Image (cartoon, rainbow, N blue to C red):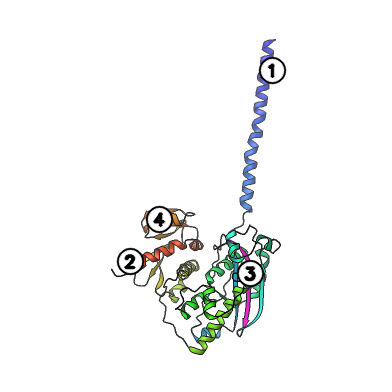
Amino acid sequence: MLWILILIGIIGYLFFRFKSKPNSLKVEPETEVIQNQKLLSQPCIKQPVSINPKINIFTKKGRSLCNDFVVLDFETTGLSATDDKIIEIAAVRYINYEEIDSFTTLVNPGIPIPAGATEVNHITDEMVRHAPRIGDVLPDLIKFIGESIIIAHNASFDMGFFKWNAAQSGGEISNPVIDTLSVSRKMFPELHNHKLGTVVEHLGISINNAHRALNDAKATGQIMIHCLRTLEREHPVMKLQPTKAVQPERMQKMPEEKTAAFEIIKSILLNHEKQCSDLCCRETKSYLVIENEGLKWFLRIKLDGKKKFVATDLDAEMIQEWVTDYQVEGNTSVGRSRVLINSHADLERLEKLVVACYEQLENQSKPA
């Protein structure tokens, strides 16, 4: 009798053991399918590649193109076009220096607005709770602007957000752009800085409720009109010295991604009040080399192949403190360090690195 009970126990053990195995084997494939479905459902990140022509209003020909323009301003949750969100849009159309029409709306960013952003622009979560999403209003904004010249103060910021969000829906923004920040630096070199508030105060332009998109756009429009009228009155034809950094023939031959990379570097340096008249670039077989005319290079950018990076002559340990989101390699064949990137758009997030490399070059070129 005992042996019969032992036999039944063994059969029962084997039955439940092998019955449970198929169930356990089913879990992982199902989980993997769900994970793969999640990965496949992630939106495809698209990089803006279009180039925006620049217009020189210090020439009569350039000013003749400015009879119809649209001033653009965004309020956002932060400074990064790729990581932060637009929460307010304003566009104001001017024809013959007169305000004709405007487009403005709050935008629901889909995330809580950081307290730091609210302190600046006073836009709260409650204000945008029932506002449209960016994908719903962007087509209307693009239609409103059409092919007009776009004016903005610190245009690289607003255009960065505009082009990034347009690219996510398959659009490209290639309108000509005029940056009143750059214009103000040339027109009012005596100012200690050229922030929007500083310039409007200098010109006696009233601006109520600053850091709201519509008011900032209208203030920028008044700056533009003031500069255009001043140039027409005092400098019917104001010729600028040729800028070696532009290199129009060479830039036209370069791939769009490398041209865009150079424009990002230049914009970062201008925003930090750096002198860019001698800034230039050249294309080698492997790199886009950024340098000052007649001086040593300060950035080498590789945008081709599987491994893309920015090579510098700074110590890797120092750089890692500034670019915590990127991998840094030291003692490379093209510099003392390099930062691995995915595309030219990552350069916008390497602002501290770009400025530090340029300042190192400045210090090396100063007479002892």
Q: Amino acid at mark 2?
A: Gln
Mark 1 vs 4, N-terminal side: 1
Neighbours of disc 2 within 10 Å: few (<14), some (14-19), many (20+): few
Which residue carries the number 3 mark?
89
Q: Please identify the quarter of the rendering in which residue 13 is found.
A: top right
Residue at horizontal 29 percent and vertical 70 percent from the top: 367
The residue that disc 4 covers is 318
Between marks 3 and 1, how big is the CA–CA gap? Answer: 77 Å
In 3D space, how far apart are the residues under numbered discs 1 and 4 (Cα atoms)?
Answer: 71 Å
Kindly indicate the quadrant of the structure image that contains residue 152. bottom right
Q: Which of the marked residues, 4 or 3, is nearer the chain's N terminus?
A: 3
Q: Which residue is mark 2?
A: 364
Q: Given the image, on which type of amino acid does mark 4 rest? A: Met
Label 2 residue SS: helix
Residue bounds of the magenta highlight: 84-96
What count of labels does the image hold? Answer: 4
